[in-house]
Image: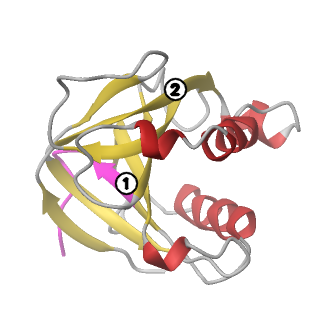
Amino acid sequence: MNPKVVEEAGFNVIGIAERTTNAKEMSGEGVIGKQWGRFFQDNLLAQIPNRADTSIIAVITDYATDKDGEYTHLIGARVTSTADVPAGMVVKKVPAGKYAIFTSEEGPVAQVVVGTWKRIWMQPKTAPGGDRAYKADYEVYDERARDPENTQMDVHVGLSKRALVK
């Protein structure tokens, strides 16, 4: 799975956020599944003002260390303005920089998301997308992700300034 490495502009996302770890998520005691449930059950996407597009964005940021440490997981939407943040929601900035874009297989959403992240975690440091910055990564759920049983999505992994594009 060779990612496409691109230079991206920064942007803001408004949504709901939780702190977690990958170990917690894999143990069955995670918060991300419940967070997604709340996002859809309470129709939170419709409550986010100034949306830039129709995609749902999940931002993984505020890393304590790396993939093994605590991080913030936010589900929301890319916005054109942060002037009106609904109660109970927060703003997170995805910084400009180099990102490796990994496209998932097609299939049930939970399976393709977990499978894509497992492949990312196995990337050697020398591979494109291997030298991670651990500042912000994000998942894009666009029109390809409308059917939860047949989803395809992209994971944008922030790269360190040392990462070279071959």
The residue at 14%/45% (across/down) is 96
Q: Colour scheme in the image? A: secondary structure
Tell me which corner region of the image, top left, top right, bottom left or bottom right, holds residue 50: top left
- The amino acid type found where label 2 is placed reads Ala
Mark 1 or 2 closer to N-term?
A: 2
- The amino acid type found where label 1 is placed reads Val
Q: Is residue 22 visible?
A: yes
Residue 16 screen position, x and y as percent? 51, 29
Report the front residue among 84 and 66: 84
Question: Tag on residue 157?
Answer: 1
Placement of the C terminus among the 4 image quadrants: bottom left
Residue 35 screen position, x and y as percent? 66, 35
Bounds of the magenta span? 156-166
Residue 55 screen position, x and y as percent? 39, 60
Residue 99 painted magenta: no
Instruction: Tell me: 80 left or right of 29.
Output: left
- Number of other residues with Cα within 10 Å of mark 1, as a class: few under 14, some 14 to 19, many 20 or more: many
Badge 1 marks a residue whose secondary structure is: strand
Report how many numbered discs are placed on residues in the image.
Answer: 2
